[in-house]
Image (spheres, rainbow, N blue to C red):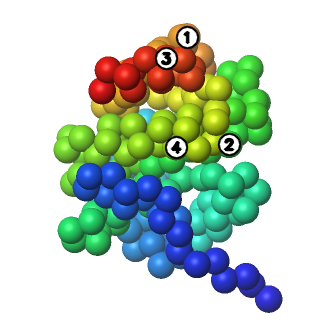
């Protein structure tokens, strides 16, 4: 028997509600992940059928249970529209010689690009990481050619500490430590 997990809101920002991703988000997830432009720097493999996203959503939901954290839906407070997702993922696989770390990520439906949404929600996620999860550091990565993501990560306080190859593509590797976050937060 499947356990019913009630929808849980984790954070509210000025404009958004950040909550668990649910199977009922499948239409929004499809709009997001079927767009070739969204996947340009993510391996160029957009989904073609909604059914492909059932496993993705279930995987994310399992991370909530296993790690107490995962990617969260971004919901517009005014319209209740699904905007995309943001959040921390606990990565236990080896990536760029790191494992067992928090990875900051976000993905937005294209019509919402350039509106400060990634920055607003990433700042909220860093606050959650350092103040709620008591993380000592948070990492992120972005394709070196993805100007938008690289700009957001720098804007919210992460530092590019090196470059590495992931599946043959050069990526920037970012990090922010607790002390850096606290210093930035004092000046916000």
Looking at the image, residue 154 sits to the left or right of residue 101; the answer is left
Question: Residue 128, which numbered label?
Answer: 4
Q: Nearer the viewer, mark 4 or mark 2?
A: 4
Mark 4 vs mark 1: which is more N-terminal?
Answer: 4
Q: Residue furthest top?
A: 162
Q: Residue drawn 31% across and 58% down?
A: 16
Question: Residue 162, which numbered label?
Answer: 1
Which residue corresponds to mark 2?
A: 90
Mark 4 vs mark 3: which is more N-terminal?
Answer: 4
Element on which disc 1 rests = strand
From this view, report whether residue 144 is shown above or below residue 71: above
Q: Nearer the viewer, mark 2 or mark 3?
A: 3
Q: Quadrant of the N terminus?
A: bottom right
Element on which disc 4 rests = helix
Question: Residue 180, which numbered label?
Answer: 3
Element on which disc 2 rests = strand
- The front one of 118 and 188 is 188
Q: Quadrant of the C terminus?
A: top left
Mark 1 vs mark 2: which is more N-terminal?
Answer: 2
Q: Callout 3 environment at 10 Å: few (<14), some (14 to 19), or many (20+)?
A: some
Q: Look at the numbered discs 4 and 2 and tell me whether their residues touch, using CB distance below 8 Å.
A: no
Residue 74, position as x, y percentages in the image: 38, 58
């Amino acid at each position: 028997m499947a356990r019913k997990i009630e929808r849980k809101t984790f954070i509210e920002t000025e404009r958004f509600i950040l909550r668990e991703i649910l199977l009922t988000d499948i239409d929004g997830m499809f709009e997001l992940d079927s767009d070739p432009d969204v996947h340009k720097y993510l391996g160029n493999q957009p989904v073609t059928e909604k059914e492909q996203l059932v496993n993705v959503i279930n995987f994310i939901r399992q991370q909530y249970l296993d790690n107490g954290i995962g990617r969260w839906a971004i919901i517009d407070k005014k319209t209740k529209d699904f905007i995309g997702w943001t959040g921390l993922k606990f990565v236990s696989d080896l990536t760029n010689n790191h494992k067992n770390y928090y990875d900051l990520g976000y993905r937005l439906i294209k019509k919402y690009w350039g509106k400060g949404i990634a920055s607003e929600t990433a700042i909220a996620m860093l606050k959650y990481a350092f103040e709620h999860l008591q993380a000592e550091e948070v990492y992120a990565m972005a394709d070196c050619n993805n100007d938008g993501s690289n700009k957001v990560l720098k804007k919210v306080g992460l530092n590019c500490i090196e470059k590495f190859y992931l599946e043959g593509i050069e990526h920037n590797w970012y990090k922010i430590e607790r002390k850096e976050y606290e210093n930035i937060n004092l000046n916000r």
